[in-house]
């Protein structure tokens, strides 16, 4: 699969382009089906996306009422914790827009991790109502990438990389803290209509180059296993992260 790779001169220009892309996909989905389903990762991705998405240029032109927001992964911490993906999204984004609160589907970590994963699948089942043996199909899944090639909370060599049935699963032994997390699995991610990797900064350049120029004689990294089965794969990079080699179209 050839990804659609877009490289922008600066982090600010990356932010504007990414937000415009998300807003366009939301408008198309809203017009077609009356709903836009998006799954978020945390960390620097939200820091890149949220400011431009909440800007005057876009904010008032977005129909926030049709958005349904989920999390690709979440750390097993209170929502008030600086490590909470939900907490970061609340601070940078949700507090500034009018997405109906009942359509922001936070992961419930008041129960044990395995029950939490099952509960999150039930929430998806209720909203998407997929046919038997099918998975939910998100309009957009936003992913970051770690310097080790992990994405979501799917880490190199982890048994969850071989999961084929579950939509959501607990991670009890993540190699970086916090060790306990909840994550979407590769089958669910790869069922997305649009899957977008976002990376910025020189610290991501080596791993981006590695993932976008895979080598058959080594074990594939988690980010390399993201290959939508019937969707489109996108990369949005700033110049610093995308500076190694020719990776296709640039923005």
Image (cartoon, rainbow, N blue to C red):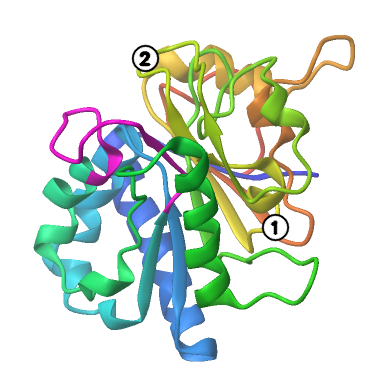
Q: Residue at x 45, y 46 (%)?
A: 116
Give residue 191's mark: 1
Magenta highlight on residue 83: yes
Q: What is the C-alpha distance between the residues marked 2 and 1?
A: 28 Å
243, above or below 76, in the image: above
Q: Residue 37: percent from the left, percent from the top?
A: 47, 69
Residue 133 appears anywhere in the view = yes
Q: Main secondary structure of the magenta part?
A: loop
Magenta highlight on residue 85: yes
Q: Residue at x 12, y 67 (%)?
A: 56
Q: Residue 119: percent from the left, percent from the top?
A: 48, 56
Residue in front for this viewpoint, 20 or 229: 229
| Residue 119 appears left or right of 184 | left
62, above or below 161, in the image: below
Which residues fall within the magenta stretch?
71-86
Would you identify the image quadrant in which residue 130 lies?
A: bottom right
Q: Residue 179: percent from the left, percent from the top?
A: 42, 18
Q: Residue at x 74, y 22 (%)?
A: 213
- Mark 1 lies on a secondary structure that is loop
Identify the residue position indicated by label 2 in the image.
Answer: 177
Would you identify the image quadrant in which residue 87 lies?
A: top left
- Mark 2 lies on a secondary structure that is loop
Frontmost of labels 2 and 1 is: 2
| Residue 228 appears left or right of 82 | right
Residue 139 appears anywhere in the view = no
């Amino acid at each position: 699969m050839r990804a659609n790779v877009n490289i922008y001169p600066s982090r600010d220009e990356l932010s504007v382009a990414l937000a415009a892309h998300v807003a366009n996909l939301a408008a198309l989905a809203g017009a077609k089906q009356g709903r836009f389903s998006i799954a978020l990762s945390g960390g620097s991705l939200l820091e890149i996306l949220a400011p431009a998405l909440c800007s005057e240029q876009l904010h008032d032109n977005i129909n926030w009422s049709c958005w349904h927001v989920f999390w690709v992964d979440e750390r097993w911490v209170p929502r008030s914790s600086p490590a909470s993906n939900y907490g970061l999204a609340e601070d940078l984004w949700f507090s500034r827009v009018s997405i109906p609160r009942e359509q922001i589907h936070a992961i419930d970590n008041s129960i044990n991790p395995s029950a939490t994963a099952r509960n999150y699948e039930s929430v998806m089942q209720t909203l998407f109502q997929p046919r038997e043996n099918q998975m939910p199909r998100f309009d957009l899944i936003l992913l970051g990438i770690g310097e080790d090639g992990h994405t979501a909370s799917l880490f190199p060599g982890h048994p969850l990389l071989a999961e084929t049935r579950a939509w959501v699963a607990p991670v009890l032994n993540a190699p970086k803290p916090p060790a306990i997390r909840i994550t979407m699995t590769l089958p669910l991610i790869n069922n997305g209509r649009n899957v977008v990797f976002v990376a910025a900064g020189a610290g991501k350049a080596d791993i981006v180059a590695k993932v976008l120029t895979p080598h058959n004689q080594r074990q594939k990294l988690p980010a390399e296993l993201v290959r939508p089965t019937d969707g489109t794969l996108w990369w949005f990079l700033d110049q610093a992260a995308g500076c190694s080699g020719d990776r296709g179209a640039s923005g």
